[in-house]
Image (cartoon, rainbow, N blue to C red):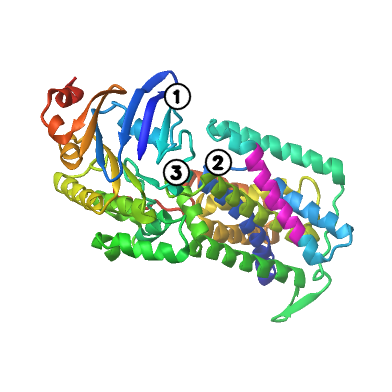
Amino acid sequence: MLKVQGLNTYYGQVCAIEDMNIHVKEREAVSVIGANGAGKSTLLKSIMGEVRPKSGKITLSDKTITNSRTFRLVNHGMTLVPEGRQVFPYLSVWDNLLLGGYTLSTKERLQMAEEVSEPFPILRDRKNQAAGLLSGGEQQMLAIARAMMVSPKLLLLDEPSMGLSPRLVYEVYEKITELHQRGTTILLVDQNAEMAIDFCDRAYVLMAGRLVGEGTKDELKDTEIVQKSYLG
Amino acid sequence: MIVDQLINGIVLGSVYALMAIGYTMVWNVLRFINFAHGEVYMGGAFVALTTMYLGAPVWLAYSCGMLSGALLGYLMEKLVYKKMRTAPKLNLLIAAIGIAIVLQNSAQLIWGASPERLASPFLANNVNIGGMMVNQHYIFIIIVTIIVMFLLEFFMNRTLMGKAVQAASQNIQATELMGINANKVISITFAIGSGVGALAGILVGPVFLVFPTMGVFAGLKGFTASVMGGMGNIPGAMVAGLMLGVLESFAAGFISSGYRDAVAMVILLAILLLRPQGIFGKVVAEKV
């Protein structure tokens, strides 16, 4: 479904991603792990059009999307749950959800808001509250539900466990697993290697902007390459 | 005397409120002050004047003026500010001042420097309100301002595009993740803010006349009102505009009309020193 070929992304003169090749098949759950600064978020930002790659090719369902504007990619069936949640803090929880369905018709938008909020009762309970007043875990749930408003073919998640307590991390992963089991293809990056590997079908290991390992979760669990990617 | 000054103040304040909306809307999405906003106010008034000279009825001339103001704001953003979006804010500020000067000089070249009166079907008549004669055009200004405020309130809080404008003001990058074209949201914001600013210029045209530098002080007053209301706060800008107009009018009536402009500047300084978030600006608690 998603193919990244020979991707190079720079911030000025600094190379953040070097010759990256990854792919995600339909209905697969793929994790990208690596220490802080490994290039995980830059990879997602390059895919999502938030950062312009210097070279390389990105295709989604055989359609080239390299350098596409972010908002257009939503129409192509790909959404991102960004790092740090990035909910709209002064808008209500419900308005945040509705904006997630901006590209839908009014009827579809309302229908989807009801549908995606069903697994998240807290969002329904607090629908009129400002999203900025939700706890970190609740904001993460909102960000995930908001990204699901357009029933994406591919859901990207950037550091979904960041800043959350272990119990909340577990809850968030439980919800992501539910979405995957319902048929959503997922590409996730996380510093929490244990959770990310446990959750996925396959994983890629990044170190200093380069791909240093890949394999199924059983192949990668407790391996030296994963430890090395974190400890150097 | 007091009621007289109050009505004058409300009329003046309505115009400042309309101007302040433009400043605050643009601030919301781009975090910069469009100091060429006063020239949109002037441009709209001149286009209305020209359309009227060409024989158009008043309603058409006013509409053309407002639409041309919206177009001017849209073009300013598309041709200049958009290309400077990643530049330091100081560059944008200097560009805005440059645009303001170019527009003033262009207006002088096209229409000349002498003030002209924009026609109004209401100017010649008075209305008796509680024994006081009030010019019908003043009532017209107040009614139009109230209608615009209600329409804006409806647009911002009851439409999806209005919510998108609010979202863009809170996190423009996340707005794109919703499938919203952030550039379109910015353009619409500029067009609406500028259209409302041009309307302010058209409304005062029959009273304070139309001339190339008419937007300089009106722009400063609108800016003062937007700071008073809390930058980015649209209802705050509306109320602050009215407050500023009334305060100025009282100062002019009870102290001296020479102090009218000084009052606005003293208020601006006081707000910046004592309450930089504005009278209605508040810091909303945000859990992370």
Does B242 lie within the magenta span? no
Above or below: residue A232 compared with residue A91: above
**Magenta highlight on residue B74:** yes
Q: Which residue is mark 2?
A: B32
Image location (x, y in percent) of residue B165: 51, 53
Q: Which of these two is toward me, B170 or B197?
A: B170
Mark closer to the chain start, 3 or 1: 1
Cβ atoms under marks 3 and 1 closer than 8 Å: no
CA distance separating discs 3 and 1:
19 Å
Residue B209, how many percent across, how many down? 81, 56
Is disc 1 placed on a helix, strand or loop?
strand
**Tags 1 and 2 touching, CB below 8 Å:** no
Give residue A73's mark: 3
Query: Are the residues under marks 3 and 1 on the same chain?
Result: yes
Q: Is residue A155 left or right of residue A33?
A: right
Q: In which image quadrant can residue A112 be found?
A: bottom left
Please state the chain letter of the residue tagged with numbered disc 2 in the rendered image: B
Is B98 or A176 nearer to us in this picture? A176
Residue at image point 43% right, 56% down: A99
**Residue at the farthest left position:** A222
Residues at discs 1 and 2 both on one chain: no
User: How many residues crowd around disc 2 within 10 Å: few (fewer than 14), some, or many (20 or more)?
Assistant: some
Q: Which residues are magenta?
A: B63-79
Which residue in the protein does label 1 denote?
A: A55
Q: Looking at numbered disc 1 in the image, what kind of residue is underneath it?
A: Ser
